[in-house]
Image (cartoon, helix red, strand yellow):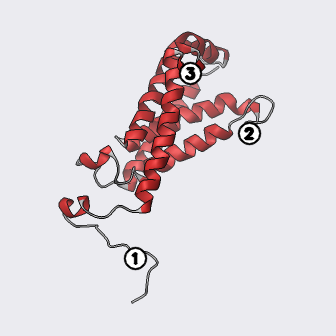
Amino acid sequence: MTPTLDTRPSTVGLSPTVEKHAPLHAYDAGLLLLRLALGFLLVGHGTQKLFGWFGGGGLEGTGQFFELSGFPSGKTLALVAGLTETLGGLGLALGLLTPLAGAAVFGTMLNAMAVNWSGGFFMMDQDGGVELDVLVAAAAAGLALTGPGRIAADRFLPVLRTHRLAYGVAAVVLGAVTASAVLLVRN
């Protein structure tokens, strides 16, 4: 028998009762920290768009920005973006419907990259950049692919209790397709 590096006891195939009482691992805590940080960062961005909180433009100001960026119906798009960031962020923070929450954030960040691309790559470039957008998109896609860990609301949902890679892949594809559809209407 060949020794492996992973010495953790496997809970695959055990009853849900045994899985529920399996010891938590460092990656569960790490995923929780990542979900909380990313999720609440996005809730803040979403509420800036929706309500003008934290120095945001609200629906009016964000809508005007979207129209100047080439999107039609700026106020409607501001509502969609604000709801997507707020609800997607809450979903990530809570670990609730994590693949879909990750897909929502991923798609929104693809659109943000398209808008901010002219500012260069790094945030310290003259007109900002896409550096943070890329990081948030990658983290959201990563969470959609890996799942939320065991410290998450998804643990109480029978379908998502044991995350499957296929759920994450389908969610990331959904986010990319949706983002592409939105970008097609941009002038």
Type of the residue with mark 2: Phe
Which mark is drawn over residue 54? 3
Query: Between marks 3 and 2, how big is the CA–CA gap?
Result: 25 Å
Q: Residue 58's x, y, as percent?
A: 54, 14
Do the CB atoms of the residues marked 3 and 1 lie less than 8 Å apart? no
Query: Between marks 3 and 1, how big is the CA–CA gap?
Result: 46 Å
For this view, does 168 lie left or right of residue 184?
left
For this view, does 72 lie left or right of residue 96?
right
Q: Which residue is mark 2?
A: 121
**Label 1 crowd bin: few (<14), some (14–19), many (20+), radius 10 Å:** few
Q: Say which element carries label 3.
A: helix
Type of the residue with mark 3: Phe
Q: Which residue is mark 1?
A: 7
Q: Quadrant of the N terminus?
A: bottom left
Q: Residue 25's x, y, as percent?
A: 39, 62
**Label 2 crowd bin: few (<14), some (14–19), many (20+), radius 10 Å:** some
Q: Say which element carries label 1.
A: loop
Can you name the residue that lies furthest to the bottom here?
1
Q: Is 184 or 24 nearer to us in this picture?
A: 24
Above or below 149: residue 124? above
Can you name the residue that lies furthest to the right here?
126
Residue 177 visible within the image: no
Q: Residue 88's x, y, as percent?
A: 43, 34
Q: Earlier in the sequence, mark 3 or mark 1?
A: 1
Type of the residue with mark 1: Thr
Q: Is 50 or 64 nearer to us in this picture?
A: 50
Q: Earlier in the sequence, mark 1 or mark 2?
A: 1
Q: Earlier in the sequence, mark 3 or mark 2?
A: 3
Q: Residue at x 24, y 46 (%)?
A: 156
Query: Between marks 1 and 2, how big is the CA–CA gap?
Result: 41 Å
Q: Nearer the viewer, mark 3 or mark 2?
A: 3
Give the quarter of the image for residue 120.
Answer: top right
